[in-house]
Image (cartoon, rainbow, N blue to C red):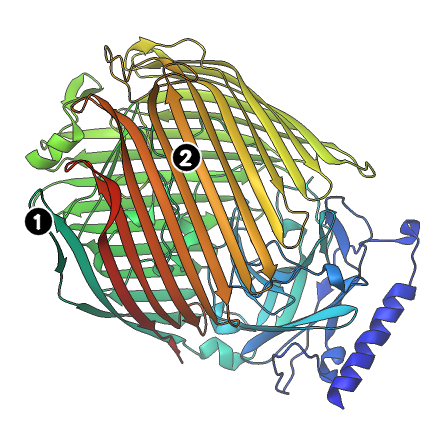
Amino acid sequence: MQKVILTLLICCYSSILLASGDKETEFKANQFLTIAPTKIDEIIAIDGKLETNWFASAAFENFTEYEPSESKKPQVNTRGYITFDSQNLYVAFICQDPNMQNLRASLSDRDKIFDDDWVSISIDPDKDQQKAYQFFVNARGIQGDRLWQSNGNEDDSFDLVWESNAQIFEDSWAVEMKIPFESLRFPNVEEQNWSVHFTRQYPRDDVYKFSWMPISQNNNSLMAQAGDLAFKLPVLKKSKRTLEVLPYAISTQHSFREETANSDSWQHENPNARTGFGVKYGISSNFIADFSYNPDFSQIESDNGQISINNPFALFFAEKRPFFQEGRDVYQIDQTSRAGGAIDQYVNLFYSRSINDPQFAGKLSGKLGKVSVGLTSAYDRNTPFIIPFEEETSVLATQKKSHNNIARARYEFGNQSSVGMTLTDRRYEGSGSNSVAALDANYRLSDRYNLSAIAAFTHTNEIEDEELSDNIGAGKFKVGSDSLTTAFDGESFNGRLLRAKINRESRHWVSTLAYQDYSPGFRADNGFFQVNSFRSAEFVNAYFFRFEKNPVFNHIKPRVAMWRKYNYDGVVKDTGLRTSLEMNLKKQTYVNMSAFIFNRENLFGRQFGDARLIWMFVRNRALKSLWGTFFINIGDQINRLGEIGNPHNPYKIVPSLRYSFSATLKPLAKLSNEMNFSSLNLWLKYGGEKIVGQKILRNTFSYQFSKRMFLRLITEYNIVEYFDDGAGQMVKSKNFALDPLFSYKLNPFSVFFIGGHFGARNNLTLDRQVLKFDDQSLFVKFQYLFRS
């Protein structure tokens, strides 16, 4: 009977929506609104079936299209409800859709739904436009969550504990969410006044997005355009302290092939068991303490292989480990822009993956009034080095032990503006240290303009290590009048970073002007920087030509970027002019074509003329069950790892071709297969002798048994081809990996995994060209979140 009543209510509501004013001219978007939910005492079952008590709750409706058009009546109607009790915030959506056969609804792992139909709520409890919690649910109840940050980034590695479910009906679908207050950070007051957005994605011939409060790209702050969510939280919640305990156990068994000219055998290491735990204590509703002993900072999913040839710089890998998620927004200091950049180096003073294998780690994070604070401390047992130089990065994996401390405070004076201070310090056992002190400011000048500045000062006492010095090379650099070596020989020196940027963002015209200055002695061992010893200025300008009723185009965006870069000796290191043409077309098709018009570099004292490249990127997502991308880059580029006088690997401008493609097949809601292929080749001349080449083929097969359980198989084949001077011929280094995984997740933190890694390669030392498996490991992991 309840299902019948529910179906009748939804059908009646859908009919009313369809019968209500169809004339576009009669549509009026919401102005600024406040929604004030009332507290309920009844228990709400989160099953996607809206009980009748929902319809007495505070409602939100009259959504507005904000992509690809703005302030336009949506093609479909959306209505929602919001309420709360002493422990949770409850949100429900009813999404009308007359063509349910076109619904995109994957049964997938969490955070894999962002190409689907979804609804979301974004909440900023502090109402300062510095961060917002975003909760997404698709039509099958699969969750996604993100942390929106003031620089415009949306971090989808961010996870919270909450509940969701959904139901699909004949001409609509419905969602219910239950968000525990203890998963959020908010002011410790009774009268709560949060910023809130309710949004819906509707991917059809275009990706349409609708919102309760109008969103305009003429405003550079998403949350400044939000409505208000006002309610009174019971006093009981204020005094409650949240305690979370996260123990884990993992068991691994590793084997490897020991191969010589006369023997070939497998060596089996003893099984290894490892346990640890994490404790999280809510000092208040807005301040959290974390501690982990022997934390499992391993990641379950392997990093995607990246093209590494002809690249002397460190590769950046995103953080996937959950410990660093709490309070991570406070460590973000750089501002991005929709205009993009060409040579602008992102300021990353805390790269959490530089803490590799800690024995213990602790954190404090939260907000005291208008001041956000963060403190991270960790003892690392295998500390890596990422050392920037003028024209390359040295990356070294070591077994050095280190004490790491990162402190951050940011005063937020509203309107998405702030000033901050960051201190980092790494102390190596035995000898050596690196310290950084930085000040930053971000000021939102208006709805379109934003000004940011960063100044950092560093002091380095190098470790002394002859073995590591052999790996880093015997180079030299100057700090002031002092000539220093690149070796780890105990030298001490200072460095600095100065950075200023002004961004303009609007629906049509976006632009960035940036200046940056990295001294030769600048190092941030807890951060990520690829180069130093330069001063540069860069200007990027782009304009969106938007078409409301064009049958082919949504927008066309021409863009130009120009820059000039000097080293500290006053030598012009890089001058460039790059143009591009971006086209967003109907049928979810995107095309970007770019070219170097002018590009001259000075590397290691050698001046190179124009290295002209053209490239194109295409993405199409028109079909529900098949979509993909294609990229090609062709032209001349500097062989950056070449050698002067080497005829097979010359240090000069050479022809190149880089291309990649991806294809995702999803024949069933629960079954998907994604294939990615990348290739880069450098030649002495096109079609002639090859200098170096690399190909990577990666395939990910996934089968989702239920919302909580899936099976995944990743395979990757990586081939690098280069000229071996000793052998006097081209050789191929081949690596193959097979990574199966079975996963069961109660929530993002209560998980059970069974998986493995099976690696194979050829052996060039033994002149073995065929692949043989030579490395394998199996693991079982169990982790469970206790919350009180």
- The answer to whether residue 516 is above or below residue 282 is above
The residue lying toward the viewer, choosing from 202 and 255, is 255
Question: From where the camera sits, is residue 80 visible?
Answer: no
- The answer to whether residue 431 is above or below residue 381 is above
Residue 338: % across, % down: 58, 36
At x 42%, y 35%, the residue is: 346
Q: Quadrant of the N terminus?
A: bottom right
Amino acid type shown at disc 2: Ile
At x 6%, y 34%, the residue is: 466
Residue 465: % across, % down: 8, 37
* Horizontal relation, residue 263 to residue 655: left or right: left
User: What residue is disc 1 on?
Assistant: 263
Q: Which mark is residue 389?
A: none
Residue 549: % across, % down: 83, 39
- Nearest to N terminus: mark 2 or mark 1: 1
User: What residue is disc 2 on?
Assistant: 454
At x 23%, y 50%, the residue is: 404
Amino acid type shown at disc 1: Ser
View extreme (bottom): residue = 1
Q: Nearer the viewer, mark 2 or mark 1?
A: 1
- Snapshot quadrant of residue 201: bottom right
Residue 100: % across, % down: 76, 64
Label 2, secondary structure: give it. Answer: strand
The residue lying toward the viewer, choosing from 473 and 744, is 744
Label 1, secondary structure: give it. Answer: loop
